[in-house]
Amino acid sequence: MAMRSQLLKGILEGCILSIIHKESVYGYELSQKLQAFGLNDVSEGSIYPILLRLQKEQFIEGEMRPSLTGPKRKYYKTTEKGLEALIAFQQEWNSIQKPVETIINWGLN
Amino acid sequence: MHAKQLIEENNLKRNQLTEENEKYYEDMLIYIRTHLFISEQQTEELVMELLDHLIEAQEAGKSAQDVFGDDPKTYCDDMIKHLPKEKGKNAAVFIGYLNLQFLGFSALASGAVTIIASFFTQVNPSIAIGSSLLTFIIDIGVIFATIAFIFMWIRRSMFKRSNKIKAGIVIGSLSALTMAIFIFVPRLMPSFGYRIEIGGYEYLLAGLVILVISKIINRKFHITK
């Protein structure tokens, strides 16, 4: 699955925002979390363009600090604006998730 | 952490990569760094993040291609477009610093040449301010155009199998052209403007003063440190 289409990008963006909101993580950790949740086909590197975009929109902020294993890492956390965006994403997602599922199942039956 | 420290750390850390991963990573590194108008600080933070990620992924048995995909150019472009631009002030200080360095070393060279020549021939110690200034501005313009061209060219040849002969011809002709401009512009420039007397030792002194000033600016704004 190439994460190129705008739809998938938008969904991945929401997921990343949600993980960062739950706990402050650095890039590699974030990619491992996405995979642990089952998004195995997302290429790991594809999180970086999204992290940059989220920073540009001021939804998240990065901060350099020592990691558990020692070396310094850039940890991300959500901002006030980021939380608003996450809530908006959740509402949008809830409003389309069910209908899309129903339509696809109906069409294929 | 400051950009210069990040660059040094990056140089050290890259040694941990396997040969294949290092090749892939360094292509991305050069491609991203040759985009001159994006913030240096943000650029270095990003390439350090990518390097840290790659090192961890490598320990887990993955290759750079697994992590960053098959199309590094599109991938990098996608990141570069989200990076903030370099602040105008930083760029102005950097360009000013380069100009001072060039002016300082030119003055030292002129001084040395004038002093050595004065042992053998009669040297005319006066220069015309107007034409000298214009020559200097043209030289600066040529230097910046050459640098911009080389960077653009490196960027375009990244991620491709490079042709060494073609590269040699392009770089060679470009250097020859730049040298030709440096030599012929002062000769062809008509002399105009106020004339001042300036001998070899004055040149040396002026050059030293200018270089000291540029050193101070460098220290104050952390340009190369």
Image (cartoon, coloured by chain):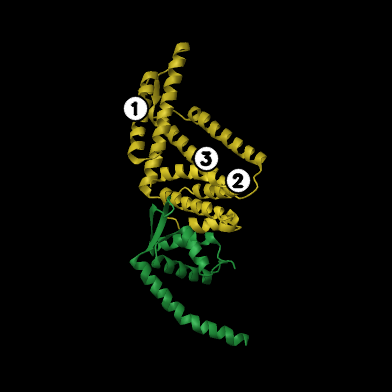
Chain colours: A green, B yellow
Report if the CB atoms under discs 2 and 3 are less than 8 Å apart: no
- Numbered badge on residue B196: none
Label 1 element class: helix
Q: Is residue A103 visible?
A: yes
Quadrant in which residue A95 is drawn? bottom left
Report if the CB atoms under discs 1 and 2 are less than 8 Å apart: no
Kind of residue indicated by mark 1: Val
Give the position of the C terminus of chain A as an image quadrant. bottom right
Label 2 element class: helix
Quadrant in which residue B71 is drawn? bottom right
Mark 3 highlights which residue? B146
Name the residue located 42 percent from the left edge and 63 percent from the top edge: A54
Q: Position of residue B213 (x, y in %)?
A: 33, 32
Q: CA distance from mark 3 to mark 1?
A: 28 Å
Residues indicated by labels 3 and 1 sit on the same polypeptide chain: yes
Name the residue located 47 percent from the left edge and 30 percent from the top edge: B189
Chain on which label 1 sits:
B
Mark 1 or mark 2: which comes first in sequence? 2
Mark 3 or mark 1: which comes first in sequence? 3
Name the residue located 45 percent from the left edge and 66 percent from the top edge: A16
Kind of residue indicated by mark 3: Thr
Q: Nearer the viewer, mark 2 or mark 3?
A: 2
For mark 2, does the 10 Å Cα neighbourhood hold few (<14), some (14 to 19), or many (20 or more) residues? few
Mark 1 highlights which residue? B209
Task: Tell me how many marks there are.
Answer: 3
Q: CA distance from mark 2 to mark 3?
A: 32 Å
Mark 2 highlights which residue? B19
Q: Is residue B37 visible?
A: no
Label 3 element class: helix
